[in-house]
Image (spheres, grey):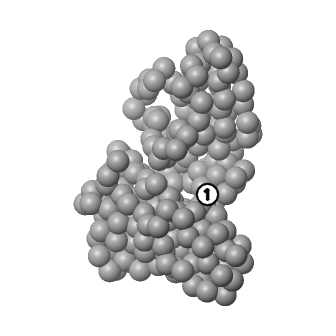
């Protein structure tokens, strides 16, 4: 069965510092990986997906199949990046997602 | 925000009672999902439905039931058999298949069992 692991429940950085939220997965097939974000008092929403290879709000994430990882990175964190971040995996066929435990990111001024 | 609505926002229930959480969407999505969100455990899938009149168990379906009689609606019943029902419940929807079938989430319902 597929599994997603986010080893850090809490992550705190200062404004302007680089930030990396870790995500590891286990899945026997070829997965699709996503990062979802939940800002305070807002709905959970999609941040980015690996297949698009895009940068959203300065965040990027590269799928590393060798290390089975999909870490989320931003070179210069901003206070408005403070939120709960979830990594998620979708099987090749199907629509259901498997989520990690989440990482609460706090960016301090 | 529109698209997906959940009601009520807060719900209180006595032990031993069943309670139904509402989820409605006007996005014309085929697929709908129910998740439970607990601190430190992320989102866990309870049930999902890819088409009207069909649904599948997720990872933690015990003590829950659903129906999908209409495309727009996917109510979740938390039964008295659910051992630890106090949690935050999220509903989501998506197009059924395809590369870009992003899931859109509702605002959630916080259920407290007294």
Q: Chain of mark 1?
A: B
Q: Where is the C terminus of chain B found, in terms of image quarters?
A: bottom right
Frontmost residue, B34 versus B106:
B106
Q: Find residue B36 and report its image quarter.
A: bottom right
Q: Residue at x 67, y 74 (%)?
A: B113
Q: Image point 42% across, 63% down: which residue?
A: B6
Q: Is residue A10 left or right of residue B69?
A: right
Location of residue B1 with respect to B47 vertically, above or below: above
Label 1 crowd (10 A; few <14 / some 14-19 / many >=20): some
Reading the image, the residue beneath label 1 is B37
Q: Where residue A7 sits: x, y (%)?
A: 74, 39
Q: Position of residue B15 (x, y in %)?
A: 69, 83
x and y, in percent, of residue A29 in the image:
54, 50
User: B52 or A24, which lies in front?
Assistant: B52
Do we see residue A57 in this rendering? yes
> Does residue B64 appear anywhere in the picture?
no
Percent from the top left, x then y, of residue A66?
64, 33
* Residue drawn where x is 43% and y is 71% of the image: B22
Residue A71's place in the image compared with B111, above or below, is above
Badge 1 marks a residue whose secondary structure is strand
């Amino acid at each position: 069965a597929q599994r997603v692991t986010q080893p850090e429940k809490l992550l705190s950085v200062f404004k302007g510092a680089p930030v990396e939220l870790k995500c590891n997965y286990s899945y026997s097939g070829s997965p699709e990986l996503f990062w979802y974000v939940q800002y305070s008092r807002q709905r959970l929403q999609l941040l980015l997906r690996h297949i698009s290879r895009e940068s959203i709000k300065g965040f990027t994430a590269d799928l590393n199949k060798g290390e089975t990882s999909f870490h989320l990175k931003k070179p210069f964190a901003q206070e408005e990046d403070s939120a709960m971040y979830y990594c998620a995996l979708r099987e090749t066929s199907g629509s259901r997602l498997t989520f990690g435990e989440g990482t609460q990111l706090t960016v301090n001024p | 925000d529109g698209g997906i609505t959940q009601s009520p926002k807060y719900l209180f229930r006595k032990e031993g009672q069943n309670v139904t959480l509402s989820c409605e969407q006007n996005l014309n999505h085929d697929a709908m999902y129910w998740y439970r969100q607990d601190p430190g455990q992320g989102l866990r899938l309870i049930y999902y439905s890819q088409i009207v009149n069909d649904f599948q168990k997720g990872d933690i379906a015990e003590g829950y039931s659903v129906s999908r009689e209409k495309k727009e609606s996917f109510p979740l019943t938390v039964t008295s058999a659910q051992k630890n029902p106090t949690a935050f419940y999220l509903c989501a929807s998506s197009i059924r298949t395809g590369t870009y079938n992003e899931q859109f989430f509702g605002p959630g319902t916080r259920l407290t069992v007294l």
